[in-house]
Amino acid sequence: LEVTTVRKDFPILSREVNGKPLVYLDNGASAQKPQVVIDTITRAYAEEYSNVHRGLHTLSNISTENYEAVRGTIARFLGAGSENEIVMNSGTTEGINMVAYGWAMPRFEAGDEIVLSVMEHHANIVPWHFLRERQGVVLNWVDVDETGALDAQKVIDAMGPKTKLVAVTHLSNVLGTVVDVKAIAAAAHERGVAVLVDGSQAAVHMPVNMVDLDVDFYAITGHKLYGPSGSGAIYVKRERLAEMRPFMGGGDMIREVHKDVITWNDPPMKFEAGTPGIVQQIGLGAALEYMMSLGMDNIATHEATLRDYARSKLDGLNWLQVQGTTPDKAAIFSFTLDGAAHPHDISTVLDKRGVAVRAGHHCAGPLMDHLGVSATTRASFGLYNTEAEVDVLVDALALCHELFS
């Protein structure tokens, strides 16, 4: 990966913040956008915009063709067996809620169990709490160990006769932990248990393949994938699609509507009600094509190098506590400082040095409880970050230590 060349593709990286060159390390929350995505969005609005699936005129045909082509791009990016297993939506949150309402709710009864890891993002927790509150579903939690690793066998052992679903992240947005979802899925399917995976972080940092992983549901979100906010998709295995009832009602997801009867469209359209985020999805397609042109293996190798360099630098700060120390973690570092420095204070000082990080609970309340902290500061790296930016981060952290110790 020629990072110097890649950085030129991202116009925002040339700006200054508070008189300092921008060092953007908040990629875990949302990534910056390459020029090709910006140009694609501009062209879609300025030259080609119309509603999709609705008209026969030229602009509608162009928009529909460009929009539907993204479904195939997502299928290639995820290694899905068919583009008809791709439901496009606004992102991971909508995708998981679709599964909760459309697949789980009509099947789960009081006492049925869902196995979750303690490091799930709220997007993969709150929909299951709805089922707990409304239908008496039991949430069965599996802890991580002292390094932040999630033992796949512990997840497997947590499955009982009433387990209907395992819902786990593929890569923790706080700890950077990579989860062996393939092993979990294989064991779950032997027990007749479905597996949903939050792929919001993993799909950004490494190659993924649905045929190989053999999970039932895999959700991604566009704004983390160098694409627009309001874009995303969920992979749903064909047999699960056949089991699901519609999540929302409206246009496009129906075949016929009469006063006394209604028939649904075929999947995946059955689950895409109303006018979609047309331009957002077209922008996402451009982002995924961009990532695939760089090579997901190349991205993973570059980020692994960044991870190792950042770890070597941060390990030398004996007043810094990093959460999550698994050797094969992603380039995501959540930490606290000795003394009275709150993560919000740390983030503010870093911002004065042009360094953008995230501070808070990172939408991972149960994990914060497990770690015994209310919040952390998080530096999360992307394909355009450099070792020189790691050095800027470390210098800014040294300033924080000096100010707050």
Image: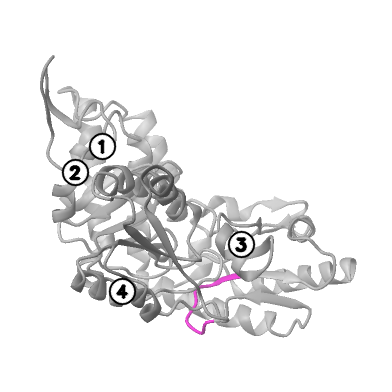
Residue 371 is situated, as x and y percent measured from the top left of the image, at: 63, 70
Q: Quadrant of the C terminus?
A: bottom right
The residue tagged with tag 3: helix, strand or loop?
Answer: loop
The residue tagged with tag 2: helix, strand or loop?
Answer: loop
Q: What residue type is labelled 4?
A: Ile
The disc at residue 232 is: none
Q: Earlier in the sequence, mark 1 or mark 3?
A: 3
Distance from the alpha carbon under mark 1 to that under mark 3: 34 Å
Check whether the beta carbons of the residues at disc 4 and disc 2 lie within 8 A of each other.
no
Residue labelled with disc 2: 268
- What stretch of residues is rendered in magenta? 326-333
Distance from the alpha carbon under mark 3 to that under mark 4: 31 Å
The residue tagged with tag 1: helix, strand or loop?
Answer: loop
From the viewer's perspective, is the residue at label 1 or at label 3 nearer?
A: 1
Q: Which amino acid does label 3 sit on?
A: Leu
Residue labelled with disc 1: 272
Distance from the alpha carbon under mark 3 to that under mark 2: 35 Å
Check whether the beta carbons of the residues at disc 1 and disc 2 lie within 8 A of each other.
yes
From the viewer's perspective, is residue 185 above or below residue 87? below
Q: Which amino acid does label 1 sit on?
A: Glu
